[in-house]
Image: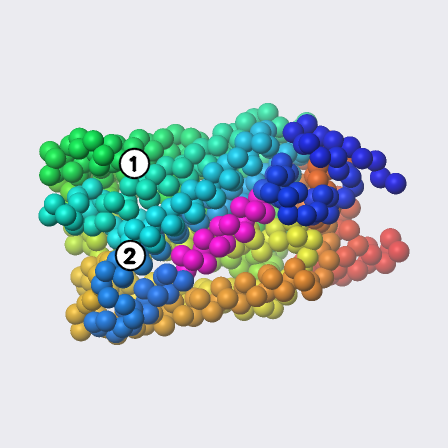
Amino acid sequence: MAAITTAPGYHEEVDPNASYLENKKGLLSWLFTLDHKRIGVMYLLSVIIAFTLGGLFALLMRAELLTRGRTLMDADTYNKMFSLHGVIMVFLFLIPAIPASLGNILLPIQLGAKDVAFPRLNLLSYYIYVFGACFGIYSMIHGGVDTGWTFYTPYSTSDPAHGGVGSSSAVIPMTLAVLVLGFSSVLTGVNFIATIHKMRAPGLSWRRLSLFAWSLYATAIIQILATPVLAITFLLLTLERFLGIGIFDPRLGGDPVLYQHFFWFYSHPAVYIMIVPGMGIVSDLIATFSRREPFGYMAIAMSSIALALLGFLVWGHHLFVAGMSEYATMVFSALTFLVAIPSGVKVFNWIATLYKGSISLQSPMLWALSFIFLFTIGGLTGLFLGMLAVDVHLHDTYFVVAHFHYVMVGGTVMGFFGGLHYWWPKFTGRLYDEKWAVAGWFFVFVGFNVTFLVQFLLGSRGMPRRYYDYLPQYESLHQISTVGSWILGLGFLILAAMFVRSLFSGKPAPRNPWGSAAYEWLTPSPPPTFNFAKDPVFERGPYDYQVATDEELYDGFDDPLFPEKGVAEGEARA
């Protein structure tokens, strides 16, 4: 009979040889767990629910824009719909999606640790997220917030009863909900930094960290430094509303441009909170499915830190037409071009890693390649918006919408689903159907490009964003975009059905189905509660396929990359 043991930070006694899914079954065991993997799974379920809600609102918006005039809803409902879509996607999905879910599940295992540094703080951050999410969605639906996800003043401060516009009475509780969500983000960042500094296994130097761990470290820095600025901004917005102090509202003598400076000082670094973890996932996927150590490992790692720091210097390019001085606009334009360099370093090194690699186009790799293609388009179109003369024409048009989605969906969402496909067998212990995975990816990739590529044309021809109606010359492009959204939705529906089916009827996953040399694949699938049977000592890098032994890479199961080797080893062991 297996020994029963406990670990620091846990109240319950567990079997160290049983998987984390088998120990302490029941709803309460999940709700009060301190296991980082279970908390990560709960985060994963929550962000997928948020993604589903935000996606449904997006589909309704695109359906409304299928024809001119009213199709499904009136203008006021449309404004509330795109506000719901923006807030849910940005604050409830894009920001927490990868760090809080996949990061929580994988980071301690990649470090050879039993858990994060502060397990109770980890559970607290999840419940803060859930409370903030529920409070925010209720506030928006009940109050009818129609300001968009940026809550620009005076729309978010002026009272319609006094000649203003917007629904400021509902904006205040919504911004307080975002303030609550910020605490969850900061706690997660503190936990990850402490874990990476203090919980690494013997032999795991900084130069042996996975690039995913490096990306989470850089993201945690942004979370800790940037989030308090947003909290202060929303507190000032609340004080102005209740005390009548003129801070942002011009009716009270405030400055609405000051709000934009505060908001984007947080929100542009927040773009890298969303993207940098996805870049870390892509780095791991490129290495695994190319069977090569990443080209320029330290350059990729340091570019994550560079993005974290430079991201704080470029917020002003969102205000080029807001009345800044010529000198300020020139400085911010130059800095905008500068911040493209770390991203370019990553793309160059990924392509160099692929060069002469033994490439396998498994479904996770398809998402990684999609990331490179789509994010490159998003980054290059961002340079257009960084040019002063061009941005004057393209500002607040559909060109910005297309650029934003190529960066966010082409970056964060592609990285998230690539990581989900890659690590799904590890944390669920089940394999999914590869054919359906490829089919789902195909529909998502095609649907996304059909939806948003034409929006570059819409914007360059002068179509303003966020408009409920449009002129006749834009109708055909809007119809193409709407049809693309349906293809995109079908792709995600296929993936949802595939993952759910795998949980109930998927084949048991081997320990290392991809033949990866990374540390997390040294544990069983799914991992035991304390991750490793004994404290590990790492003597090589996470991508060193030359040093990794056959026993580490293969365990007798048919390997998708080298099936003959997997079968041969299985027969030999039998």
The amino acid at mark 1 is Phe
Of callouts 2 and 1, the N-terminal one: 2
- Work out whether 179 lies above or below 390: above
Residue 443 in the image: above or below residue 262 = below
Q: Which region of the structure is painted magenta?
A: 40-55
How many badges with numbers are in the image?
A: 2
Amino acid marked by disc 2:
Lys
Residue at left 61%, top 39%?
32
Tell me which residue sits at (52%, 40%) in the image. 126
Residue 241, located in which quarter of the rendered image?
A: top left
Q: Secondary structure at mark 2?
A: helix
- Which quarter of the figure is the N terminus placed in? top right
Question: Which residue corresponds to mark 2?
Answer: 80
Work out whether residue 222 can be spotted: yes
Q: Where is 118 relative to 482, above or below?
A: above
Where residue 311 appears, as percent x and y from the top left, is: 35, 37
Q: What is the distance, in whole Å, between disc 2 and disc 1 at their CAs?
A: 20 Å
Q: Is residue 208 left or right of residue 479?
A: right
The local crowd at label 1, few if under 14, some if 14 to 19, many if 20 or more residues have their Cα within 10 Å, is many
Q: Which residue is mark 1?
A: 234
Q: Is residue 214 magenta?
A: no
Percent position of residue 364, x then y: 57, 56
Query: The residue tagged with tag 1: helix, strand or loop?
Result: helix
Determine the residue positioned at 70% across, 47% down. 25
Q: Is residue 418 left or right of residue 386?
A: right
Magenta stretch prevailing secondary structure: helix
Residue 137 position, x and y percent, is 38, 50
Residue 96 screen position, x and y as percent? 46, 44
Q: Quadrant of residue 481?
A: bottom left
